[in-house]
């Protein structure tokens, strides 16, 4: 008997096949039972007709409990009433693993309960849809950067120096030395760009974020491209093309998942139209002040209400350009006409999803960079290798980091970032 996945059923209409699946739900009358089946590739329905299968198989079907795993044999047919479009008319059922008192029943559960049962919650159709979209974004990322001539480079996860805010570092032992978990692979990616031209990384990132927000995870995945011989303007173009590409890929390949999530695809289509609008940090401050945000003065970093307000003025993701030097990282290059701001941008997602990309042109002058390292209270010796990059054929270069889970949350239109990663690590949670 041909063993297929639910997703493949469209290629086997009229054929007898075997499918391994879990029972997500079940309805039955005296004569017919409808099994909602899940195998990871998709969800669809199994029909068990008493007069066709006989008393024994019918009673077995009627007794199936939620999440019991089974092997079923039957014939695939079209099912025009379901979104999926196919179903299986069951002939035989074999129970593989029983399931009793499955804790996540189709009724409503509180968030903490669901988070405690994340290992089971992942089986729901909503979580399935989110993970499909996450996977598509990852696939499209590799596709885009490979197509554009980038090569993937993996920066280390255990590091000795901190690229970003040192209060958010996770410390660990490294034999008789101290080490940190990576907060960003950027500095290493700069070295890689000097070796390979256009590079990108995709890896886990760790930040001890002390505040609870719906956008911050403790462990998240970041995509960090870095490009030699590229100024910030050119980097902005790569950024918007990349973001439009992943949105388009999800529209093209995740139609079903988007419908499960009830995502407004007209909004998503709008996000594929380039270019994205831009506003300077200076103008953003003025705009905020004019609209009653008196908690912001020039020099402050924006919080989520500010980013949300600015994003609302546009119908696409928006770049906020040229933040004050004092609130950005040491490696960003100052604006050539203005010492007080740097050549950087944050890309803010629409609909209140906040910053999805942070990027900048890098300081490439040896003396200026040494000075910046001192100003930030960092030690030159720790950054000796990084400074070397400015000694041996230094070239203008730019790069950016996109938070995968931020992008997933935004594209899926979900409430909280915790659902965009299989096993979220949060301020008060490292289980399961
Ligand atoms: P935020 O201002 O939201 O705290 P950030 O400016 O600290 O973000 P960057 O250092 O610029 O973040 O990192 C690049 C990208 O990584 C961000 O634009 C965002 O998409 C993502 N990111 C940053 N911190 C987190 C986090 N704690 N959880 C999930 N994604 C994050
Ligand atoms: Mg942050
Ligand atoms: Mg930020
Ligand atoms: Mg940032």
Image (tube, rainbow, N blue to C red):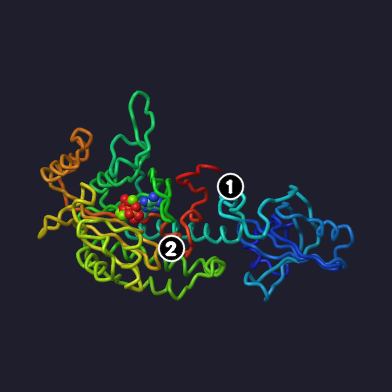
Q: For mark 1, what is the residue?
A: 116
Left or right placement of residue 325 versus residue 204 in this view: left
In the rendered image, the quadrant that contains the N terminus is bottom right
Q: Position of residue 271 (x, y in %)?
A: 38, 71
Q: Position of residue 350 (x, y in %)?
A: 37, 68
Q: Residue at x 44, y 66 (%)?
A: 249
**Dot 1 and dot 2 residues touching (CB under 8 Å):** no
Indicate the secondary structure of the residue bearing disc 1.
helix
Could you tell me how far apart the alpha carbons at marks 1 and 2 are, in whole angstroms?
A: 24 Å
Of tags 1 and 2, the one toward the viewer is: 1
Q: Position of residue 424 (x, y in %)?
A: 49, 48
163, 150: nearer the viewer = 163
Q: For mark 2, what is the residue?
A: 410
Circle 1 Cα neighbour tier, 10 Å, few/some/many (<14 / 14–19 / ≥20): some
Is residue 293 visible in the rendered image? The answer is yes
In the rendered image, the quadrant that contains the C terminus is top right
Q: Residue at x 35, y 23 (%)?
A: 176
Q: Earlier in the sequence, mark 1 or mark 2?
A: 1
Q: Position of residue 12 (x, y in %)?
A: 68, 66
Q: Residue at x 89, y 62 (%)?
A: 54
Q: Residue at x 63, y 60 (%)?
A: 108
The CB of the residue at mark 2 lies under 8 Å from ligand 1 = no
45, 11: nearer the viewer = 45
Q: Quadrant of residue 377?
A: top left
The residue positioned farthest toward the top in the image shown: 176
> Quadrant for ligand 3?
bottom left
């Amino acid at each position: 008997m041909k063993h297929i996945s639910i997703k493949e059923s469209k290629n086997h209409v009229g054929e007898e096949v075997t499918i391994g699946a879990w029972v997500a739900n079940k309805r039955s009358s005296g004569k017919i039972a409808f099994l909602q089946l899940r195998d990871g590739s998709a969800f669809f329905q199994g029909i068990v007709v008493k007069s066709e299968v006989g008393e024994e198989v019918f009673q077995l079907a009627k007794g199936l409990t939620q999440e019991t795993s089974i092997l079923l044999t039957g014939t695939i047919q079209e099912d025009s009433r379901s979104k999926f479009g196919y179903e299986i008319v069951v002939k035989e059922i074999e129970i593989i693993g029983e399931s009793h008192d499955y804790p996540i029943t189709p009724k409503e559960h509180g968030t903490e309960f669901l988070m405690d049962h994340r290992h089971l919650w992942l089986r729901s159709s909503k979580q399935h849809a989110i993970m499909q979209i996450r996977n598509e974004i990852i696939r499209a990322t590799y596709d885009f950067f490979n197509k554009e001539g980038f090569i993937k480079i993996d920066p280390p996860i255990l590091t000795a120096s901190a690229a970003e805010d040192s209060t958010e570092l996770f410390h660990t032992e490294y034999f008789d030395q101290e080490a940190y978990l990576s907060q960003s692979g950027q500095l290493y990616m700069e070295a890689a760009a000097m070796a390979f031209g256009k590079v990108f990384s995709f890896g886990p990132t760790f930040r001890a974020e002390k505040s609870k927000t719906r956008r911050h995870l403790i462990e998240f995945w970041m995509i960090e491209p870095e490009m030699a011989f590229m100024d910030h303007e050119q980097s902005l173009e790569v950024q918007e093309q990349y973001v439009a590409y992943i949105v388009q890929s999800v529209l093209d390949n995740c139609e079903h998942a988007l419908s499960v999530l009830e995502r407004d695809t007209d909004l998503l289509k709008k996000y594929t139209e380039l270019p994205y609008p831009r506003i300077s940090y200076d103008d953003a401050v003025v705009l905020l002040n004019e609209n009653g945000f008196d908690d912001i003065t020039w020099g402050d970093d924006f919080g989520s209400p500010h980013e949300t307000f600015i994003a609302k003025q546009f119908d696409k993701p928006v770049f906020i350009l040229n933040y004050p030097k004092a609130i950005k990282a040491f490696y960003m290059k100052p604006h050539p006409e203005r010492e007080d701001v740097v050549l950087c941008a944050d890309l803010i997602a629409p609909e209140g999803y906040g910053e999805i990309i942070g990027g900048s042109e890098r300081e490439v002058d040896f003396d200026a960079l040494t000075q910046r390292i001192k100003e930030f209270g960092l030690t030159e010796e720790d950054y000796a290798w990084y400074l070397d990059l400015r000694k041996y054929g230094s070239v203008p270069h730019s790069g950016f980091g996109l938070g995968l889970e931020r992008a997933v949350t935004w594209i899926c239109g979900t409430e909280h970032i915790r659902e965009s990663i299989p096993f979220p690590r949060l301020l008060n949670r490292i289980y399961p």
